[in-house]
Image (cartoon, helix red, strand yellow):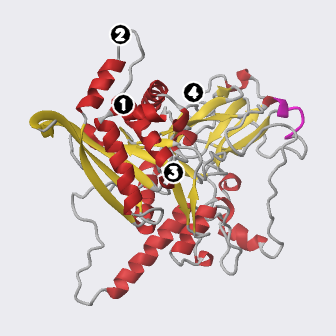
């Protein structure tokens, strides 16, 4: 007899608490192998294909494309040990709904049967936070007391139609979907430090928030919704009686959900503006010799060196002179934290929005190595294949907005970083060179910095050194 195993959304790392289903890679009734990807999800960091650690027949899927799924919520159930012939004729089975196959397997195996002889079907491989070896401990669930049980059962919504106890057509049974939390005094279910921090920043009492996660778990979306509702109530209280009610939708308006990558970026931008007292300075520089240096480097047969790689090398040299700027601020401890390595982020525009891939240990790479790594990360970003680790923990950002044909900008700092160098377009302009007016290739450089980590003298010294290296690339030889 096959054993039904439930596979839940694993911890994808980097503090991520939920993901959005992009597309399913398997159908109900399909036979899957161990570690075969079953669903593609989008997190706040990247697109990820999630492999299932069990091999067998898919008996149910939970959630349609576009559904937001919290970490720990069920994704699929798999009948481990079911023979491939069990799913023959999976296109339509007697008793199935809408042509979706359902597999006749026990929904609740006998105690001890789940781990008997089937753990070998699970891989030992992990994403982050889940494993499938036989020694892995199961999560303990806190069962309600006998007095609470009737209230919880009465609050549980009726399950959808099932076949042999198994959910069909991509919906979950009542047990798999979780139960509603009873009214009255309750323990606040929060596991994410991010959720607690957001609530603390907005003076929100978590005891007044009802969680939408499994077993009443309070998710980030729950807190953000509560914060929005609190703000709306406060705004409504401040309105005069004669103010028109503008809450209704406007005909023809378009609403775009702030979810996934777009939502994560919006939250980061808002937090940066809310927490960091930033300032910006800028200068024009003659980039004619820098362009000539790049042409001289790109000899036939040698790996190409990009202009962005040259600018990245200038940034690492400047940060070696001004280490105060490779830093962050620990607001809880009220300390400036100077970082030993330069993890250089660079802004990249993709079809999914703006992302910032990170070149690890950029201070130890040559221009050629920087160029190769930037090219690799850019290709991965455009394909949506960057891992969360490749989009996180940067210490300094290089923003080349000149590719959009603009001269200058005052960008928002990439929280929690303390500084960002902006590079405008390089254009032919009149310029005084060697005491005479000439047409030169001129670029505007801007530098945005956290005023808590340094004053204007440090920021101006950094930007001036960058501009000098752009105008005289030979200055970089001193730092090689």
What residue does disc 3 label? 323
SS assignment at label 3: helix
Magenta part of the protein: which range?
A: 114-120
Dominant secondary-structure state across the stretch colored magenta:
loop
SS assignment at label 1: helix
SS assignment at label 4: loop
Q: Earlier in the sequence, mark 4 or mark 1?
A: 4
Disc 3 from disc 4: Cα separation:
63 Å
The circle drawn on residue 474 is 1
The residue mark sitting in front, 2 or 4, is 2
Residues at circles 1 and 3 in contact by the CB criterion of under 8 Å: no
Q: Earlier in the sequence, mark 3 or mark 4?
A: 4
Image location of residue 69, percent across then percent down: 57, 51
Disc 2 from disc 1: Cα separation:
22 Å
SS assignment at label 2: loop
Q: Nearer the viewer, residue 154 or 233?
A: 233
What residue does disc 2 label? 300
């Amino acid at each position: 007899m096959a054993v039904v195993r439930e596979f839940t959304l694993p911890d994808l790392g980097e503090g991520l608490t939920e993901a959005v289903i992009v597309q399913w890679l398997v159908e109900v009734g399909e036979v899957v192998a161990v570690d075969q990807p079953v669903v593609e999800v989008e997190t706040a960091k990247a697109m990820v294909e999630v492999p299932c650690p069990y091999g067998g027949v898919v008996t149910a899927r939970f959630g349609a494309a576009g559904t937001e799924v919290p970490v720990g919520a069920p994704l699929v159930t798999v009948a481990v040990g079911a023979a491939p012939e069990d799913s023959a004729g999976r296109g339509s089975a007697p008793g199935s709904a809408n042509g979706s196959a359902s597999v006749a397997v026990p929904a609740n195996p006998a105690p001890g049967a789940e781990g008997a002889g089937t753990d070998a079907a699970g891989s030992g491989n992990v994403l982050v936070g889940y494993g499938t070896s036989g020694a892995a401990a199961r999560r303990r669930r806190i069962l309600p007391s006998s007095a609470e049980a009737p209230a919880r059962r009465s609050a549980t919504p009726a399950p959808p139609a099932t076949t042999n106890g198994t959910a069909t057509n991509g919906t979950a049974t009542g047990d798999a979907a979780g139960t509603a939390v009873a009214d009255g005094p309750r323990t606040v279910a929060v596991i994410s430090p991010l959720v607690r921090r957001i609530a603390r920043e907005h003076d929100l009492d978590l005891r007044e928030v009802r969680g939408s996660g499994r077993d009443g778990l309070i998710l980030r979306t729950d807190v953000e919704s509560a914060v929005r509702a609190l703000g709306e109530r406060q705004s409504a209280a401040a309105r005069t009686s004669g103010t028109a009610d503008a809450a209704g939708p406007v005909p023809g308006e378009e609403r775009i959900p702030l979810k996934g990558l777009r939502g994560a970026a919006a939250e980061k931008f808002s937090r940066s503006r809310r927490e960091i007292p930033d300032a910006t300075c800028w200068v024009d520089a003659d980039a004619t010799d820098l362009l000539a240096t790049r042409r001289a480097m790109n000899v036939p047969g040698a790996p190409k060196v990009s202009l962005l790689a040259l600018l990245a090398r200038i940034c690492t040299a400047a940060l070696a002179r001004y280490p105060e700027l490779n830093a962050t601020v620990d607001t809880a401890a009220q300390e400036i934290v100077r970082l030993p390595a330069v993890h250089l982020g660079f802004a990249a525009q993709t079809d999914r929005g703006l992302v910032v891939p990170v070149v690890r240990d950029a201070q130890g790479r040559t221009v050629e190595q920087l160029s190769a790594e930037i090219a690799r990360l850019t290709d991965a970003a455009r394909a949506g294949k960057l891992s969360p680790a490749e989009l996180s923990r940067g210490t300094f950002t290089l923003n080349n907005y000149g590719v959009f044909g603009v001269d200058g900008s005052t960008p928002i700092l990439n929280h929690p970083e303390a500084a960002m160098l902006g590079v405008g377009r390089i254009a032919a302009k009149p310029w005084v060179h060697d005491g005479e007016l000439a047409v030169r290739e001129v670029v505007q450089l801007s530098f945005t910095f956290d005023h808590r980590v340094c004053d204007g003298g440090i920021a101006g010294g950094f930007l001036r050194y960058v501009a000098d290296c752009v105008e005289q690339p030979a200055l970089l030889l001193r730092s090689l």
